């Protein structure tokens, strides 16, 4: 009996395809952004009567993580992220989910220091050896980030799910926020888009796309460090709401308009072919529908679908320039539309 879909990690005779045990995959299975905003509306409006710590970032701007300032002036970042399998290989699934969870800390300008595992597992359907491989992948990526992993929580679940709750530290004066983009600043992107359509093709056909796995398992630590070194103030990471969705949230919170040069946006090899073959997730289409009322575009629907492609463990979207991250547009004073694509 196999415990992995990858032959160099175990001798296989009957592969398990993890993506076939879940209705969705990766960040594409998020609750749609508009629906989620309605659910949480007003829930962050108040806090404890006598807080010891100061809440610096909460729900208001739809940022990537919560941040409090504790005694001594340190900013503590808290986030959690988990999802169903985005690839069939258990070890890679663990690596991707961990990199994705850690990314929220980097998107705030922080350094992850502690993570705990979040696990749902159909123990009567999938062998626990597979789960061990998932956890091993998560542990390896966390250790690459210099982050401790200490236990966690697991439940018996009809679908496999994995992720992490992560705690990070930052300088409260040097946070990267969702609401700090300024008109006149360029827009940069630290990773190419396209993992959504490639992952959807993988789920349906079983084809493996090494370039997508490599992108999803790459940490955003270097992009974060470069942003802080360059004095940038605003960033977010591109995940389930797609580039357009996350950029819309940033521009809306900052009171500016974001202008995207579609020809400057980088894509993974094979992404356009996957889109042309019809491998578009429902989440990507919902992303585009959500931003469309606020969008002015001179490109066709195909290009917009790629820009709305639901990413998993995507790169940092930055208000400013850093090395090795292409400039894909600029922020301008707020106009009639919050997003423009040319």
Image: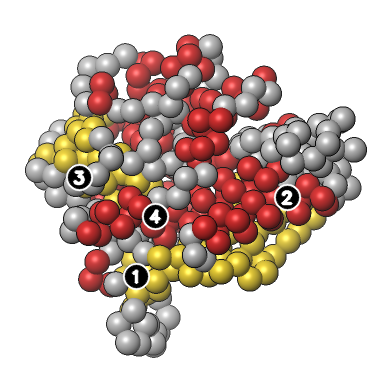
Any part of residue 166 in sight: yes
Q: Which mark is residue 321?
A: 3
Label 1, label 4: how many angstroms apart (C-alpha)? 13 Å
Residue at 62% x, 26% y is: 208
Please state which of residues 303 and 135 is positioned toward the viewer in this rendering.
Answer: 135
Any part of residue 18 in sight: no
Image quarter where the N terminus lies is top right
Q: Are marks 3 and 2 in contact (CB under 8 Å)?
A: no
**Which residue is label 4 attached to?**
221
Image quarter where the C terminus lies is top left
Of circles 1 and 2, the one toward us is: 2
Precedes in sequence: disc 3 or disc 4: 4
> Which class describes the residues within 10 Å of circle 3: few (<14), some (14-19), or many (20+)?
many
**Which residue is label 1 attached to?**
170
In the rendered structure, the answer to whether residue 248 lies left or right of residue 256 reads right
Precedes in sequence: disc 3 or disc 1: 1
């Amino acid at each position: 009996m196999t415990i992995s879909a990858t032959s160099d990690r175990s001798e296989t005779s009957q592969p398990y395809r993890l993506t076939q045990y879940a209705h969705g995959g990766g960040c594409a299975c998020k609750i749609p952004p508009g629906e989620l905003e309605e659910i949480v509306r007003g829930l962050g409006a108040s806090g404890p009567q006598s807080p010891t710590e100061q809440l610096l970032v909460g729900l208001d701007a739809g940022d990537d993580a919560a941040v409090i300032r504790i005694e001594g002036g340190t900013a503590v970042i808290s986030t959690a992220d988990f999802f169903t399998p985005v690839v069939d290989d258990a070890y890679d699934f663990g690596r991707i989910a961990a990199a994705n969870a850690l990314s929220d800390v980097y998107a705030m300008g922080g350094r992850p220091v502690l993570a705990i595992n979040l696990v749902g597992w159909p123990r009567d359907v999938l062998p626990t050896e597979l789960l061990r491989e998932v956890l091993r992948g998560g542990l390896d990526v966390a250790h690459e980030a210099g982050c401790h992993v200490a236990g966690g929580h697991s439940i018996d679940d009809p679908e496999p799910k994995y992720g992490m709750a992560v705690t990070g530290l930052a300088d409260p004066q040097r946070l990267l926020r969702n609401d700090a983009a300024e008109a006149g600043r360029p827009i940069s992107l630290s990773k190419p888009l396209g993992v959504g359509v490639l992952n959807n093709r993988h789920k349906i056909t079983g084809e493996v796309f090494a370039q997508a796995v490599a992108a999803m398992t790459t940490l955003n630590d270097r992009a974060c460090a470069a942003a802080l070194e360059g004095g940038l103030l605003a960033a977010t990471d591109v995940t389930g709401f797609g580039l357009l969705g996350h950029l819309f949230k940033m521009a809306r919170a900052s009171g500016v308009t974001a202008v995207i040069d579609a020809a400057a946006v980088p894509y993974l090899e094979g992404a356009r072919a996957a889109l042309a073959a019809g491998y578009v997730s429902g989440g990507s289409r919902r992303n585009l529908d959500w931003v469309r009322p606020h969008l002015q575009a001179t490109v066709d629907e195909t290009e917009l679908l790629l820009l709305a492609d639901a990413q998993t463990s995507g790169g940092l979207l930055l208000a400013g320039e850093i090395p090795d991250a292409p400039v894909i547009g600029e922020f301008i004073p707020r106009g009639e539309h919050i997003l423009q694509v040319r």
